[in-house]
Amino acid sequence: MSYNAVYPTETIEAHRALITRRRTLRPTEEYRTPTETEWEDFLGHCERRKLSVGTCARAYGTACIHEHACVRCSLLRTDPAQRTRLVEIRDNLIARIAEAEHEGWLGEVEGLNVSRAGAENKLKQLDAQVSPAQRAVHLGMPG
């Protein structure tokens, strides 16, 4: 075993050297200043990541494969403060499924069931994020 002291200045210098080496391997056009249109497009992408129940983690320049049915998407990062909103969405989906079944809209039922399963999955993910210290534990009655 050995001990190695690392100082902030050494770390910064090593990181700068790494970046310099990496930049020599990449095309220089990747390091140009973006045009005004490119910058506005990027900022617009960042603004569109904000959703009612959380944040979309979709990478810049990629299309939404779920056609903005975000509750179905694994890239939705749900905000724990929006749990009640997500429950409302799930409950609304259940009511819409019942209506669609009553009306015989089987194609609609199938799509709504996918969304309902997505909402329930997001709720399970939120519940799993609760730390053990925040979970209620029944200790029983003292004897």
Image (cartoon, rainbow, N blue to C red):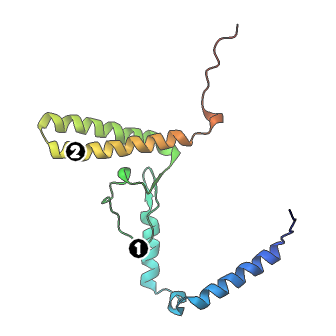
Q: Nearer the viewer, mark 1 or mark 2?
A: 2
Point out residue 76 in the picture as x, y percentages from the top left corner.
44, 54
Query: Residue 61 got which mark?
Result: 1
Q: Amino acid at mark 1?
A: Gly
Mark 2 secondary-structure assignment: helix
Outermost residue, top side: 143
Q: Write down the residue under mark 2.
A: 110
Q: Amino acid at mark 2?
A: Glu
Residue at the location (52% across, 91% down)? 27
Outermost residue, front side: 1
For the residue carrying disc 1, how many other residues have a C-alpha within 10 Å: few (<14), some (14-19), or many (20+)? Answer: few
Quarter of the image for residue 74 reads bottom left
Residue at the location (60% across, 87% down)? 23
Q: CA distance from mark 1 to mark 2?
A: 30 Å
Please indicate whether residue 120 sits to the left or right of residue 79 in the image: left
Residue at the location (35% across, 64% down)? 64
Residue closest to the eye, 1 or 51:
1
On the rendered image, what quadrant is the C terminus found in? top right
Point out residue 88 in the picture as x, y percentages from the top left corner.
37, 39
Query: Residue 127 got which mark?
Result: none
Residue closest to the eye, 92 or 70:
70
Mark 1 secondary-structure assignment: loop
